[in-house]
Each structure stands twice: as structure tokens, then as C-alpha cells.
Image (spheres, rainbow, N blue to C red):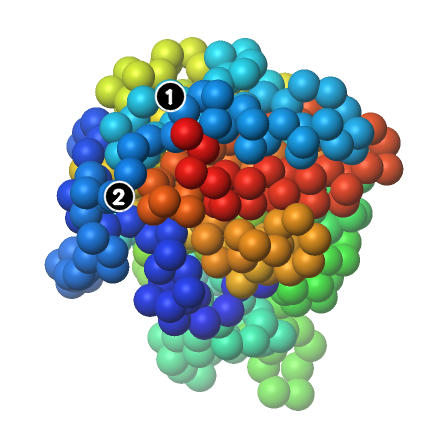
């Protein structure tokens, strides 16, 4: 459920991946909504970057839209693949007009796996300031030599082992350096960890007990370093059981006085009005959304859902995050022709087996995002992995039936036991842009990789046809 995040994404946007990036002039409904958040805004917000059209206006694309009969013919052979386990939920829309072209089980709710992150991304970009950043602070404690590290919910906070990355992330070493500068000659004897911003259980409803040990996600806490990894990303090893205390221990090691024992570490609360000693800030909300989608980053998805909860006055918990995301989407979905109740989430990442989403809702969101609201929701498009190039699709579409669509598909992957999904955008041979969702929710045991190859072949069939 994870893939590489590298600095080459910017080059891809202007290179081969441009085959599926959207130009100005695509007609689609406005998603609307006015952002508000408890996140800190950037000190000097930058203007929306100018984006020259990468392709001619899609409304002028040659040829007419595909037909349902043509799409059925193109997909027929691939849909018989036994690894798919039975009828696939299919939604294909013409992204030029937003009109549905082929929908089978598209109005049924299915277990979405990580394609649910598209909904979380839309909610975050609607409710939060795009240049908002998550702060991690250190304040003075109750006595000399005591400091309190206050978690704000930034899972990208980096430790000493984290390599340079794009976008640049906040670093624990910078936090420690600021503390030392603020305290001068006063040695730190005790580090108190305040992770009280989050409430409720640290593991989501419907989560497998193996997720933490398998490295899929860390226990969700308001203070983490390297997303609670034992070894730094991209290692897919187990996570620590208490990321907040582990982060406090790492900070204590950086603050250890020369020749003295390391400061003690304990959980507690910052005092009201405590003097701030240090602060570091995450990448922007837009960048966090991109990273979440590209890597299918479960920790980031849960963090963003909680930031939406805080912005909407809900508890920063699984329940509060789910309620807040659905509240935001209730104002968005009708504008794209989807029912407010068509996204039912128990978490922000899609790891929960209680999550339910209508595939037709995701395609309607994608079609609209590709149109008039692309300025606000552009991080969804740029965050979708590019087939055969990066993110969770970096190693897919390299061989077999999916190969012809390498570079021509941007899509979010979804994988759970029994579920394989692919939802995104593809340009057909005739230059028509389609939004699609393909969800196989009856995948037999042991057939996950085969089902992924089968879905890649179906996406390639969409890319390679005129389908009329």
C-alpha cells in the first residue's frame, strides 16, 4: 500500500505524466466550500502558481465520447480474469462532460480500501487552508531543566535517520537546536511528552491487529517521529507501540547534556501559557495531500482526517475525523451529482473494513476535480501515482497487459484482503479523458498480485480504445 516518494515527481508532471494531466477549459461542476482550519497558515502565503495548459482544452478533444457498448467490448476479456473473483464494480465517466458512460454496481457501496483516501483528500483541501502547516512545539516545563514537547499531529516529523526528501519536512534536530539556543546554559533534565491533542483509541475500528507489526500504520498519536518506524522510510518494517514516547526519547537524546545522563521522559501536559522555546512546521496541506496519495500513506491520511476534525470542532479521534470528513463531503458531493451518504468512513485511510464508498462517487469527484475546481484540488491530480513511474504504481504497468498504459494513467490504488481497486484518470487513444473506478471486492485468497495485474490490464484497455 506504499510506494516511493522522490524529487522526480515535479519532472514527471511536466514530462511523460503530462499525458494525463489536465488542461484549462475542462467543463465540470464546482465543488465549492470555504476553507477554515485550526492549522497555522504560512507566514507569507504564496500566490497560486501559474499553470500553463499542458494540453489543448479537453472540450476540444477530437472524436466523440466512448459509448457503453464500446467500453463493454473493450473490458469484456479482462473482466473474465479469475483473480478478480467475480463481478467488478465499475464506474467510467466522460471527464469532459461528467456524463456516466458505463456503470456496473457503481451505486452500491463497496469496501474501497485506499481509494477512500481520495475522499479524505477532498475533505482536507475543502476544510483546511492550502498553505496551512502542522506545528510541533517545545515549551518550558514546570521547573528548571524541564521541557514539554507538544504534538500537533505531524507524522512527517523527521529524525536523524530520515534522508533528504521532497517536500522538505520538519526535523527533530532543528527542534532540539532551538531548545538549546533558548535555554542557553540551563541543562535539560526532563522531557515531558504532551500528545493530548488526539482523543480515543490509537487503532482504528475494523483494523487488523497485524497492521502495526506489518508496518502498514503506526498507532495514531499526535506526536510521532518517522511515523513511528523502527527503521526509516521506505523500510516496511514494524512500527513502535508508543510513537509519542519514542519521539520524546529521541528528543531527549538530542538534548542530553555533555557528559550527563540523558533526560528522563514521561507523558504529561503543557502548562497554560507556558513559554514557547521552539517550533517546527510540517509541509503545507497541499503537499501533505500529494504525499498521502502518492505513497498511499496511512499515517498521513489519519493525520489529515484529524486536522479536518479540529477545523470542524470535532474531537481529534477516529469517530470525530470520520464525522468531520463526512460533514465536509455532505456539502461537496451533491455539487458533483453524488449522494451525501455515498461515502461512509470509519477512518481516514481506508484501512478499516467498516468503510464503504460508492465507486460512482469517486469518479464524479475525480471528474469535477479535473475541471473548474482544479486550482483548489490540483494536489489530488498531482498526487495520484503515475502508471509505471512513481508512488504505488511505480512497479506496476511495467510488464504484461498493463504495459501499454504506462504514463497514460494516473490512479489511486487500493488493497486489502479480498479487495483490489484502482480509481483515477486515463486518456483514451482518441484523446478523450475518462474518470474511472474499478473495484474487485471478491478477490480470492492469494490472488492479490494477479488481481492488480488484471486491473492494470483493464485500465490499459480504456487507454487503448476509442470505445465507440
Helix, strand or loop at disc 1? strand
Relative vertical location of residue 152 with respect to residue 264 in this rendering, above or below: above
Relative vertical location of residue 283 with respect to residue 301 in this rendering, above or below: below
Residue 153, horizontal then vertical, whole percent: 46, 47
Residue 165 shows up from this direction: yes
Residue 247, horizontal then vertical, whole percent: 60, 60
Residue 257, horizontal then vertical, whole percent: 58, 81
Horizontal side of residue 426 vs 299, given as left or right: left
Give neighbour class at mark 2: few <14, some 14-19, many 20+ (Cα, 10 Å).
few
Residue drawn 23% across the image and 50% down it:
23
- What is the count of numbered marks? 2
Closer to the camera in the image, 18 or 62 = 62
Say whether marks 1 and 2 touch (CB < 8 Å): no
Relative vertical location of residue 359 with respect to residue 406 in this rendering, above or below: above
The Cα–Cα distance between marks 1 and 2, rounded to whole angstroms, is: 19 Å
Image disc number at residue 123:
none
Q: Mark 2 points at which residue?
A: 62
Q: Quadrant of residue 97?
A: top left
Closer to the camera in the image, 195 or 410 = 410
Q: Mark 1 points at which residue?
A: 100
Residue drawn 17% across the image and 61% down it:
52
Horizontal side of residue 421 vs 208, given as left or right: left
Horizontal side of residue 435 vs 132, given as left or right: right
Helix, strand or loop at disc 2? loop
Whichever of labels 1 and 2 marks the residue nearer the N terminus, that label is 2
- Residue sticking out furthest to the right: 446
Q: In which quarter of the image is residue 340?
A: top left
Question: For the C terminus, which image quadrant?
Answer: top left
Give neighbour class at mark 1: few <14, some 14-19, many 20+ (Cα, 10 Å).
some
Residue drawn 41% across the image and 43% down it:
428
Closer to the camera in the image, 186 or 464 = 464
Amino acid at each position: 500500500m506504499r510506494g516511493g516518494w522522490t524529487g522526480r515527481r515535479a519532472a514527471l508532471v511536466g514530462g511523460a505524466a503530462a499525458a494525463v494531466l489536465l488542461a484549462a477549459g475542462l467543463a465540470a461542476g464546482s465543488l465549492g466550500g470555504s476553507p477554515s482550519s485550526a492549522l497555522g497558515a504560512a507566514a507569507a502565503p504564496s500566490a497560486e502558481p501559474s499553470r500553463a495548459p499542458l494540453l489543448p482544452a479537453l472540450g476540444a478533444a477530437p472524436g466523440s465520447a466512448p459509448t457503453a457498448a464500446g467500453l463493454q467490448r473493450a473490458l469484456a476479456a479482462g473482466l473474465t480474469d479469475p483473480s478478480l473473483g467475480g463481478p467488478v464494480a465499475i464506474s467510467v465517466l466522460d471527464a469532459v462532460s461528467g456524463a456516466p458512460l458505463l456503470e456496473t454496481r457503481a451505486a452500491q457501496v463497496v469496501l474501497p480500501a485506499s481509494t477512500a483516501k481520495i475522499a479524505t483528500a477532498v475533505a482536507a483541501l475543502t476544510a483546511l487552508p492550502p498553505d496551512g502547516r502542522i506545528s510541533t512545539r517545545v515549551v518550558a516545563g514546570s521547573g528548571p531543566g524541564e521541557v514539554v514537547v507538544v504534538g500537533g499531529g505531524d507524522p512527517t516529523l523527521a529524525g536523524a535517520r530520515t534522508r533528504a526528501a521532497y517536500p522538505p519536512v520538519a526535523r527533530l534536530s532543528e527542534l532540539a537546536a532551538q531548545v538549546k539556543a533558548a535555554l542557553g546554559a540551563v541543562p535539560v533534565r526532563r522531557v515531558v511528552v504532551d500528545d493530548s491533542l488526539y482523543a480515543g483509541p490509537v487503532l482504528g475500528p475494523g483494523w487488523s491487529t497485524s497492521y502495526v507489526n506489518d508496518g502498514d500504520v503506526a498507532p495514531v498519536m499526535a506526536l510521532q517521529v518517522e511515523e513511528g518506524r523502527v527503521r526509516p522510510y521506505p523500510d516496511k518494517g514494524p512500527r513502535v507501540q508508543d510513537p509519542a514516547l519514542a519521539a520524546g526519547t529521541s528528543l531527549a537524546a538530542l538534548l542530553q547534556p555533555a557528559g550527563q545522563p540523558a533526560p528522563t521522559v514521561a507523558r504529561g501536559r503543557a502548562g497554560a501559557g507556558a513559554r514557547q522555546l521552539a517550533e517546527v512546521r510540517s509541509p503545507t496541506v497541499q503537499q501533505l495531500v500529494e504525499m498521502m496519495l502518492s505513497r498511499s500513506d496511512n499515517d498521513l491520511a489519519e493525520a489529515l482526517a484529524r486536522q479536518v476534525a479540529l477545523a470542524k470542532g470535532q474531537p481529534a479521534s477516529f469517530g470525530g475525523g470520520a464525522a468531520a470528513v463526512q460533514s465536509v463531503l455532505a456539502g461537496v458531493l451533491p455539487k458533483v451529482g453524488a449522494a451525501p451518504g455515498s461515502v461512509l468512513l470509519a477512518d481516514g485511510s481506508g484501512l478499516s473494513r467498516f468503510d464503504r464508498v460508492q465507486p460512482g462517487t469517486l469518479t464524479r469527484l475525480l471528474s469535477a476535480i479535473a475541471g473548474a475546481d482544479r486550482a483548489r484540488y490540483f494536489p489530488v491530480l498531482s498526487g495520484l501515482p503515475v502508471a509505471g513511474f512513481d508512488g504505488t504504481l511505480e512497479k506496476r504497468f511495467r510488464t504484461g497487459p498493463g504495459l501499454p498504459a504506462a504514463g497514460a494513467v494516473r490512479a489511486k490504488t487500493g488493497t486489502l484482503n479480498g479487495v483490489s481497486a484502482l480509481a483515477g484518470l486515463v486518456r483514451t487513444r482518441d484523446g478523450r479523458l475518462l474518470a474511472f473506478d474499478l473495484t474487485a471486492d471478491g478477490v480470492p485468497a492469494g490472488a492479490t498480485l494477479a488481481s492488480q495485474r488484471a486491473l492494470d490490464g483493464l485500465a490499459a484497455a480504456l487507454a487503448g480504445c476509442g470505445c465507440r
